Structures are given as C-alpha cells and as structure tokens.
C-alpha cells in the first residue's frame, strides 16, 4: 500500500492510498498481500492485468479521478513521503512546513494546552484486560491533529497577530514535524484523554510502551465487584484522577467490552454540544423506592423521593463529575446501608443519579436517556446481566441496530462534525510560512459551519458487551467502514444522499483508514475494478 499526500480543491492536505489488490479485510494478526506476491498458474494473467490497471489509474489524472472509489482521502489524513505519519515526527514532502520550526527552541507543551482544547476523558473500568485496544487505537487515529473550530480564534490570533511568542508556542506545540509528547494515548491527539482502572494485581507491571494505555493507569485502585459499592469506588477514583486535568470537560465511563458507535469527531461534538449529563436523574423513580430504600439511609440531604436508577455507564459534565468526587454524605449512606445488590439494587446504578437528584441537579440530566451504552436485554432473564455477543453476532447490521432510531439521521451529524473541525497539523505541515498558515486558518472561519444536527438524546454513543473472543470480528467491522470513506467522504455528502448514506456507518475515516492501510490491516477489494467499469 502506497500513500501520496496531495491538496484538494480547498487547499487541505489528504492522502491517496494505492490498493494492493487483496479482497480481504484483515485484523492485526494478518499479513500483507498485494500485487507483489507469488502468483501461480492461471492467477498470473489476471493478476498482472490488475496491477497494470492500477498503475495506469495512479499515473493518469483522468483515470485517477474516475477511480475515486479506490482513494480513501480526507482533509485531515496525510502522510509524508518517507512513510511517517503526522504526529510521529519525521518529514519529507512537507511543502516547507519544517521551515516553520527553524531556530525555535520548543518547550515540552501540548497543542491542547496552548489552545485550551477541551477534552473528553474516556474512563476505562476493567478487571484485567482491554481486548479492544486495537480498535480504540485506530478510532483515536481519526482525532489526531484535529482542531475544533471553537478553538480556531486562538490559533488565528497566534498565526495572524503581532505576538511572535504566541506564534512560536503554536508551531512548537501543534506541528506534527515535532515529536509530540505522548500523554493522551497517541501523539498529536488533542480531543480525548485516557484513564484506566484495573484491579491492583501484584504482578501487573503496566502496559507496554507501545500501548495507547501506557502510563494511563490511575495510581489509586481497588478490587471492584459487580453489584457492590466497590464499583462506585473505582468510578470515583477514575473521576478524581481525570479532574486533575482542567481541560477535561466530559467524562465517559466504558468497560473492557465497550466499543464506540460513532467516529471520534461525531462522538466528541455530540458530547461537547450537550450541556446535560448522559445519566437519568430527573423525573421520579420508576419502581417503588422501598425496593432499595430503607429509613436508615435518610440524611439531611438524602430522602426517599431522591432515589433514582440509571445505567452504570455514564457521560458526565465536569460540574457533575466534581459533585460526585466531592460527595461524602450520600456515598456514606450507600456504603453503610446499601453497599451491595442484596439491599434490593446495585449501588453502581443508583448512587450517581440519586446523588444528583438530591443535589437538585436532576433537570441538568436527560430524562429520556439511560446512559451512554447500548446493552442487549432481550432474550436474557429478568435482572440478569445484558447479553454477551458472540463472534458470529458481530456484523454491520448489528451496529446499525445498536444505533436504533438514530441510524437514519446519524449521517447528518457525522457531516456536521467533520465540517466543524480542521486539521491544524496538516496546515502547519503544508504551509511554507506564517502568512500561509494565517490565510488557511482564516479560510476556515469564513466557512461558518456549526454542529446543528445533534443526535437525539436517546442515542447511545457506545455499545456493549463484546467479550474478548469478539475482538477480531469487531475490528473487521470498523475496518470495513473505511470503504465507505473511499466511496463518499462525510464532507461531500449532500442532503438528498442522507437516506442511503446512513448505511455507511463511518466508524473509521480519514487518517484512521490511512494508518490501517499502511499497517496492512485493510485493503480494497478487486471487485471495485468491475464496479468502476
């Protein structure tokens, strides 16, 4: 697979991926194939013909345009000629972008710190393993280098103003040509921060330095059990650690069996444009409170009518996260009088919504939402755990089902999300001087796009439960959506195309697909040759 950096009609960097000709989508353990392989017997002529057709397509601008399906390009996915990716250092054909760094002594600061980019803290709660790490890593690649337009004025001020120190800080912190500090899972990724809580196993030595979770394990941990107050303890420890970073503004709890239901840009914009927490603390308790409540639980703050139930897997605003960590009174009541499911309900499903209701915060949560995570309850006994999916269950159709009522209009949200971010890294790499950077950033401002098609409040953002045995199948579904990007970029979608575009999912796009292709995880099907004819 060969990558070529180019600029589109908007002057934004993108990459063309030259297909190697295999029909398979492969998970991490697979090996690469392509035109250079051992062909046998009758394979030789068709294979040679295919390779010649591909070479002609890439050498002819006319054919290259006709064969657009073969080119998963996007405004923020770009690679250098030497094969290194943005955010990994290196360089090559960077259109003079390295000149921006000439003579600069750069402090060890991040782009998110310089521009104050708000982040979503992903709080991973696991017993021991994180089997979907490869899928999460590719998913996060789609966020590398991306700048929300809400933070565009600061970047413009630094590039276009008279403050040379502000310009120096911007280039030092945000240029992919400078090796970025690896503090958020991936170098150059500014939208998400990662935190992991796992049991304090004595033989645990930490994640490999190649892992996105390296250095992200919270220092204070405890053994957590289902249906026990210890799960609340683990959640509070995760929140406390994440709150130390003032840039974390949303906090999402995920388990080792969770995967995202939308691409990272839509996921991010949906959370950031929602002023309420994704937990159900409003309204009245749906079942008789006495099922959980007992008189001894009452405190000056907590009363019977405050009892609520919601999903354990929440999405909290920073204000609500701070309230959860600061609480002593309601937590102590649960710990003393309802510390396990034996009291009539699981503390991890009742504590946070009950606390928020007691504090009068119910109306700042969602009345029609039950948390962030889809869970399958049909076909399982009442009050049991949700269904564990099997490898054979994992299909594109399942992911559309999990999006539920939101599937039909999701592509409008995806398109808006891509219109309201830009690749600052691509601009800094492909611009020769400060004036060029200023001009490019000003062109973003004139576009005036906003995230106007938010997902319904009942839309889930993650899905579970996908146990370890489904990891390869889940990854293949994500990789398969790279073909949707190749067929039609989110930015290119017109309103009249939304009815059929909803089937494309767009779980991985842009840079994520470029990385997957470079690693040999995804290749485009030979059948596309006939389809383009």
Image (spheres, rainbow, N blue to C red):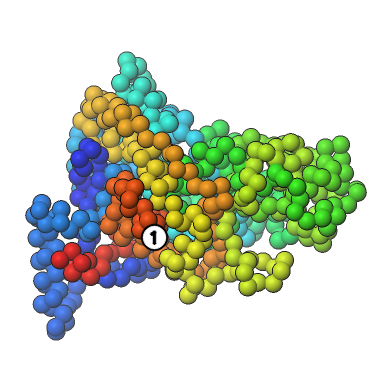
Q: Is residue 310 left or right of residue 462?
A: right
Residue 66 on image: x %, y %: 15, 56
- Dot 1 falls on a residue whose secondary structure is helix
Residue 527 on image: x %, y %: 23, 70
- Residue lying furthest bottom: 41
Q: Quadrant of residue 478?
A: bottom left
- Residue for point 40% across, 66% down: 476
Query: Which residue matches tag 1?
Result: 503
Q: Nearer the viewer, residue 522 or 85?
A: 522
Q: Is residue 336 left or right of residue 182?
A: right
Residue 40 on image: x %, y %: 16, 82
Give the number of marks.
Answer: 1
Residue 220 in view here: no
Q: Quadrant of residue 128?
A: bottom right
Looking at the figure, which quarter contains the C terminus?
bottom left
Q: Nearer the viewer, residue 28 or 526?
A: 526
- Residue for point 15% across, 74% down: 47
Q: Quadrant of residue 327?
A: top right
Q: Nearer the viewer, residue 216 or 369?
A: 369
- Residue for point 11% across, 61% down: 55
In the picture shown, does residue 326 fall above or below 339?
A: above
Looking at the figure, which quarter contains the N terminus?
bottom left
Q: Is residue 4 left or right of residue 75?
A: left
Mark 1 nearby-residue class (10 Å; few <14, some 14–19, many ≥20): some
- Residue for point 32% across, 18% down: 161
- Residue lying furthest front: 496
Residue 378 on image: x %, y %: 62, 69
């Amino acid at each position: 697979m060969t990558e070529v950096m180019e600029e589109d009609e908007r002057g934004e960097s993108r990459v063309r991926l030259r297909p190697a000709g295999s029909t398979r989508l492969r998970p991490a353990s697979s090996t690469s194939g392509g035109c250079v392989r051992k062909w046998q017997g009758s394979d030789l002529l068709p294979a040679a013909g295919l390779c010649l057709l591909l070479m002609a397509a890439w050498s002819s601008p006319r054919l290259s345009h006709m064969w657009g399906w073969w080119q998963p390009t996007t405004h923020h996915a770009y690679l250098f000629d030497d094969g290194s990716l943005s955010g990994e250092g290196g360089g090559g054909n960077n259109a003079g972008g390295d000149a921006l760094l000439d003579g600069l002594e750069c402090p060890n600061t991040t782009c998110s710190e310089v521009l104050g980019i708000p982040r979503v803290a992903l709080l991973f709660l696991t017993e021991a393993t994180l089997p979907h790490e490869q899928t999460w890593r590719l998913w996060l690649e789609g966020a590398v280098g991306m700048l929300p337009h809400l933070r565009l004025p600061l970047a413009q001020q630094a590039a276009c103003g008279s403050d040379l120190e502000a310009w120096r800080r911007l280039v030092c912190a945000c240029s992919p040509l400078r090796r970025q500090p690896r503090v958020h899972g991936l170098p150059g990724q500014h939208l998400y921060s990662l935190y992991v809580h796992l049991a304090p196993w004595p033989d645990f030595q930490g994640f490999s330095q190649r892992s996105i979770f390296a250095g992200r394990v919270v220092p204070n941990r405890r053994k957590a059990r289902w249906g026990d107050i210890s799960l609340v303890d683990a959640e509070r420890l995760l929140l406390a650690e994440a709150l130390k970073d003032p840039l974390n503004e949303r906090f999402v709890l995920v388990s080792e069996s969770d995967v995202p239901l939308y691409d990272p840009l839509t996921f991010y914009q949906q959370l950031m444009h929602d002023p309420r927490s994704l937990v159900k603390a409003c309204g009245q308790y749906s079942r008789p409170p006495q099922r959980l409540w007992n008189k001894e639980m009452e405190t000056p703050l907590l009363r019977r009518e405050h009892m609520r139930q919601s999903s354990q897997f929440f999405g909290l605003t920073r204000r609500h996260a701070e309230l959860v960590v600061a609480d002593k009174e309601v937590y102590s009541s649960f710990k003393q009088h309802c510390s396990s499911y034996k009291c009539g309900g699981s503390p991890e499903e009742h504590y946070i919504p009950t606390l928020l209701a007691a504090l009068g915060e119910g109306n700042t949560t969602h009345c029609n939402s039950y948390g962030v995570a889809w869970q399958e309850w049909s076909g399982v006994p009442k009050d049991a755990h949700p269904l564990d999916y099997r490898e054979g269950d994992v299909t594109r159709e399942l992911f559309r089902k999990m999006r539920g009522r939101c599937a039909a209009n999701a592509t409008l949200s995806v398109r808006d999300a891509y219109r309201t971010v830009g690749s600052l890294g691509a601009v800094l790499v492909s611009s020769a001087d400060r004036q060029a950077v200023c001009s490019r950033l000003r062109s973003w401002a004139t576009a005036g796009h906003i995230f106007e098609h938010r997902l319904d409040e009942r839309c889930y953002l993650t899905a579970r439960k996908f146990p370890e045995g489904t990891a390869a199948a889940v990854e293949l579904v994500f990789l398969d959506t790279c073909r949707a990007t190749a067929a039609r970029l989110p930015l290119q979608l017109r309103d009249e195309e939304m009815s059929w575009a909803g089937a494309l999912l767009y779980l991985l796009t842009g840079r994520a697909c470029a990385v997957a292709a470079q690693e040999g995880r995804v290749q485009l099907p030979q059948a596309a040759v006939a389809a383009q004819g």
